[in-house]
Image (cartoon, rainbow, N blue to C red):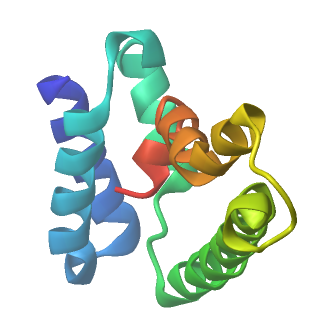
């Protein structure tokens, strides 16, 4: 991976300029750190970086806006699910059943992030 990292660093510096040097270096180190064998070989890593590196302010702004909007939606819906699952425990709606406690103890947000982290999300967020 070090060879890929050096090649990508040179390539991205040539494409985006010295002003992006620190971001390129940091981003590459983060992606390589989180990269797992099941993610693919060096060629897959290189394609991922070339495709996803936001090398100018416009690309960064677009990425930030989309992440912010989509993650806010995800967080809001996860909160809504958690609230609904805990309704029987939180409100006086009758006797609690064992399944009420099962639903009330379930955390969909934790499960969702655990699953998401196994995908490329962990790389995009680095």
Q: Is residue 7 above or below residue 86?
A: above
Q: Which quadrant: the C terminus?
A: bottom left
Given residues 103 and 77, the one toward you in this image is 103
Could you tell me which residue is drawn at 17 percent across and 47 percent down? 29
In x, y percent, where is residue 84?
A: 81, 63
Residue drawn at point x = 34 percent, y = 11 percent? 37
Residue 111 appears in the picture as rendered: yes
Which residue is at 71% across, 81% downward? 69
Which of the 4 quarters of the picture holds residue 24? Answer: bottom left
Q: Is residue 81 visible?
A: no
Which corner quadrant of the image does residue 41 belong to?
Answer: top left
Tell me residue 61's x, y (percent): 57, 88
Q: Which of the pair 83/6 is nearer the observer?
A: 83
Between 83 and 48, the residue placed more toward the observer is 83
Q: Residue at x 66, y 36 (%)?
A: 102
Q: Taking 27 as reference, is 69 left or right?
A: right
Q: Is residue 87 above or below residue 96?
A: below
């Amino acid at each position: 991976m070090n060879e890929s990292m050096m090649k990508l660093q040179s390539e991205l510096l040539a494409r985006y300029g010295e002003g992006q040097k620190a971001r390129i270096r940091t981003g590459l180190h983060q992606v390589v750190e989180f990269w797992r064998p099941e993610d693919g070989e060096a060629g897959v890593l290189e394609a991922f970086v070339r495709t996803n590196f936001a090398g100018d302010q416009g690309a960064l702004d677009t990425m930030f806006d989309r992440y912010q909007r989509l993650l806010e939606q995800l967080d809001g819906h996860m909160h809504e699910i958690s609230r609904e699952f805990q309704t029987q425990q939180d409100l006086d709606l009758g006797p609690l059943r064992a399944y009420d406690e099962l639903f009330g103890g379930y955390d969909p947000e934790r499960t969702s992030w655990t699953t998401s982290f196994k995908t490329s999300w962990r790389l995009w967020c680095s």
